[in-house]
């Protein structure tokens, strides 16, 4: 059978048109925002140069290390507390909301609705809303992280329960087991490793978010960065960034290790 | 012998126009080994699940062991389910738990809420689990996690869990559909042995006609939600098979005249 050359020609043409449209949109956006591509590109070396000259920790900054460490510890502990407490609440809501284990459809929809509400409001938005109630305190950051983690974990736990324990729940129902027995002997053992994995993921994300929330609420490591940066103490600010990066690496390493062991 | 299970005019409707079961009636005597055969989507699984009300039938009456099943309340339904063991195509075990724990799950239906939730089993129950596992040839696997077992071994754990309920009847939903011919034979032999030596009634959904012919006391043929054959395997003719499977029957390569062709398309 002869190869239809038109077929390939047409595919190429479609790709070309798509690339053309993409370039046009990019150019349009540049014109509207008056972005100078050449200036943008040439300023990158300048930025790097500035960074090397100013953005490094010096002896003065290292003297501030104990204070930075104190704030970093506060941030880490708040993230951990928010994730774990959210995990406990999420487990209850996930069991009520999952289609495998829900008690009835009304409660199920209710639990799902709550989770969606908490998940879809961004952590920064939560922080600003809560600022009114709790002011600039660690509690504001804690609750902001808690709400978002709770919404996310409920969703993740529900999917885990549906995916992992669907079949064994059916089997235990068929033996005449009661609802609490089914949850404890089938749902929890099947889904606990994946749930812990999600919890670790939330913990990691929370450390990152906590830094940002800290800038808003004036607590933790975010506040340290904001303070040093705005007072033009770039050396200390750079030390804060390095401290955050190191702690994120350390925790990621740790949680990957835990995952390897439990999964 | 009296009828253990009596199914009368049972229908199941999904949505407004999908009729999964249409006025199904049959009865099963105590100790009988009954196979339900039919093409995919004929309603075999739905039929089985209506009996222990994993699915609620839309209409009709089901009587099991003198109890009218559709009218039971939650507690009575749990008691009914303890008398009926169920075996699944995908074994439905808790894979992260050990063989022993999975088998003991068969006793959960008999426990109070607290004892069930805490998983408190008596010494006698554990002893019985050990005995059942040795009958099923799983003594060495007793403390292994179920995700380390082969498909055939997992299905034997499933059978063990059902047997620990001390059931009057086993409902088997395509128990060998995911197994190779060798493991299938082991499972079918165990089920036959359970039926004949323990006197437990077996109602089994099967895909493989030759296996149904070989093992059953009676065959029920289901097509499009209706019973189209109900009788002994010896009396089954090619016309019956065509009635059950429709035009597909010719591609099934089944010749009921010669029943020893068992492994022609097993597995």
Image (spheres, coloured by chain):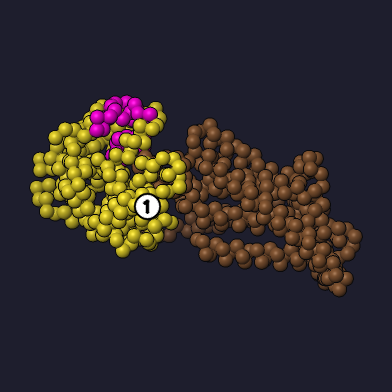
Vertical arrangement, residue B27 with respect to residue B33, above or below = above
From this viewpoint, is residue B79 visible?
yes
**Shade representing chain A:** brown
Pick whichever, A133 or A2, lies toward us: A133
Residue A216 x/y as whole percent: 80, 50
From this viewpoint, is residue B241 visible?
no
- Residue A50 placement, left or right of B142: right
**Shade representing chain B:** yellow
Vertical arrangement, residue B4 with respect to residue B174, above or below = above
- The image quadrant of residue A117 is top right
- Residue B205 placement, left or right of B108: left
Residue A54 x/y as whole percent: 86, 69
Kindly identify which residue carries mark 1: B102
* Residue occupying image coordinates x 14% and y 35%: B1
Residue B69 magenta-highlighted: yes
Magenta-colored span: B44-73
């Amino acid at each position: 059978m002869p190869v239809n050359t038109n077929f390939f020609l047409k595919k190429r043409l479609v790709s070309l048109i798509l690339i053309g449209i993409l370039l046009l949109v990019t150019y349009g956006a540049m014109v509207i925002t008056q972005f100078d591509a050449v200036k943008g590109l040439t300023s990158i070396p300048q930025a790097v140069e500035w960074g090397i000259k100013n953005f490094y920790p010096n002896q003065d900054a290292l003297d501030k290390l104990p204070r930075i460490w104190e704030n970093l510890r506060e941030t880490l502990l708040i993230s951990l507390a928010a994730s774990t407490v959210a995990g406990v609440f999420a487990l209850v809501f996930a069991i009520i909301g999952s289609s495998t284990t829900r008690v009835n459809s009304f409660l199920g929809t209710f639990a799902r609705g709550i989770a969606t509400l908490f998940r879809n409001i961004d952590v920064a938005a939560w922080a600003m809303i809560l600022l009114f109630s709790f002011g600039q305190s660690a509690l504001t950051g804690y609750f902001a992280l808690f709400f978002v983690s709770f919404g996310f974990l409920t969703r993740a736990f529900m999917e885990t329960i549906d995916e992992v324990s669907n079949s064994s729940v059916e089997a235990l129902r068929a033996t005449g087991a009661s609802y609490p027995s089914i949850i404890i002997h089938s749902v929890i053992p099947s889904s606990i490793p994946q749930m812990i994995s999600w919890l670790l993921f939330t913990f990691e994300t929370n450390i990152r978010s906590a830094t940002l929330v800290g800038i808003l609420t004036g607590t933790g490591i975010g506040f340290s960065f904001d303070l040093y940066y705005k007072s033009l103490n770039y050396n200390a600010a750079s030390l804060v960034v390095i401290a955050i990066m190191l702690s994120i690496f350390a925790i990621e390493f740790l949680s990957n290790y835990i995952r390897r062991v439990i999964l | 012998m009296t009828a253990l299970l009596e199914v009368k005019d049972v229908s199941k409707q999904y949505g407004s126009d999908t009729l999964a079961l249409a006025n199904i009636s049959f009865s099963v005597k105590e100790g009988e080994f009954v196979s339900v055969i039919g093409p995919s989507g004929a309603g075999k699984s739905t039929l089985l699940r209506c009996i222990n009300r994993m699915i609620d039938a839309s209409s009709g009456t089901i009587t099991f062991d003198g109890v009218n099943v559709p009218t039971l309340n939650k507690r009575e339904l749990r008691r009914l389910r303890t008398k009926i063991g169920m075996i699944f195509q995908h074994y439905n075990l808790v894979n992260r738990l050990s063989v022993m724990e999975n088998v003991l799950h068969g006793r959960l239906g008999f426990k109070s809420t607290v004892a069930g939730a805490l998983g408190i089993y008596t010494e006698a129950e554990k002893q019985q689990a050990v005995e059942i596992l040795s009958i099923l040839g799983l003594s060495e696997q007793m403390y292994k996690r179920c995700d380390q077992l082969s498909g055939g071994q997992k299905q034997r754990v499933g059978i063990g869990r059902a047997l620990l309920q001390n059931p009057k009847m086993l409902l088997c939903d395509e128990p060998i559909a995911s197994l190779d011919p060798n493991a299938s034979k082991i499972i079918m032999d165990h089920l036959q042995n359970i039926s004949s030596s323990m006197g437990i009634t077996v109602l089994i959904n099967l895909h493989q006609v030759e296996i149904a012919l070989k093992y059953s006391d009676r065959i029920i043929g289901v097509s499009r939600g209706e019973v189209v054959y109900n009788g002994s395997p010896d009396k089954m003719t090619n016309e019956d098979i065509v009635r059950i499977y429709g035009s597909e029957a010719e591609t099934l390569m089944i010749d009921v005249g010669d029943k020893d062709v068992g492994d022609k398309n097993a597995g």
